Structure formats: C-alpha cells, structure tokens
Image: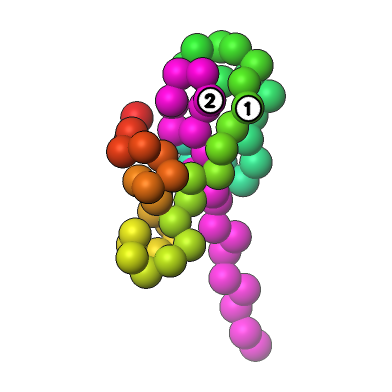
Amino acid sequence: MTQKKPKQENWWQCSMCGYTMQAPVPPGACPSCKETCAFTDVTCYTPECGGEGNIDNRLAGGNKK
C-alpha cells in the first residue's frame, strides 16, 4: 500500500502590505492589514530557490513576514 504525499501549501503574499503566509488557498482578507487584497503565489517551484515548501524571494521581493 502506497502512502499519499501530503498536499504542499503555497506561500501567499498580500499585494497591499506584503504579509506572507502559508495556506492551501489565499484568504478573502489579509490577516495582517485586514483589507480585501489580491494575493500573489510566491511559492518556490525550482531548486534554485530551495524547492517546494520555500518562498521564492525573487517573486516575494525579498520580504519574509
């Protein structure tokens, strides 16, 4: 019997305040600034930035909040 690999949660960054969080889907409102914002997926998908489960600082602008 093969075990399923747990689903990796993505890293999401708020377009208003830059808050970064890990969740399966972006929230409706930012937990930090409480605004209804657009969220950008800043998850790393390549070995150059550390691979799955890490933030791609090239996309996040160097912010890790």
Residue at horizontal 43%, vertical 44%?
Answer: 59
Q: Position of residue 56 (x, y in %)?
A: 39, 50
Q: Can you identify the residue that label 1 sits on? A: 38
Circles 2 and 1, Cβ within 8 Å, touching? The answer is yes
Residue 50 is left or right of residue 5, and the answer is: left
Which quadrant of the figure contains the N terminus? bottom right
- Determine if the magenta segment contains residue 10: yes
Can you tell which quarter of the image residue 25 is in? top right
Decide which of tag 2 and tag 1 comes sooner along the chain.
2
Q: Amino acid at mark 1?
A: Ala
Query: Looking at the image, which residue sits at the far top?
Result: 34
| Badge 1 density bin: few <14, some 14–19, many ≥20, Cα 10 Å | some
Q: Amino acid at mark 2?
A: Ser
Secondary structure of the residue carrying numbered label 2: loop
- Measure how far apart labels 2 and 1 are at the Cα level: 6 Å
Label at residue 15: 2
Residue at horizontal 60%, vertical 12%?
Answer: 35
Q: What is the magenta range? A: 1-20
Can you tell which quarter of the image residue 7 is in? bottom right
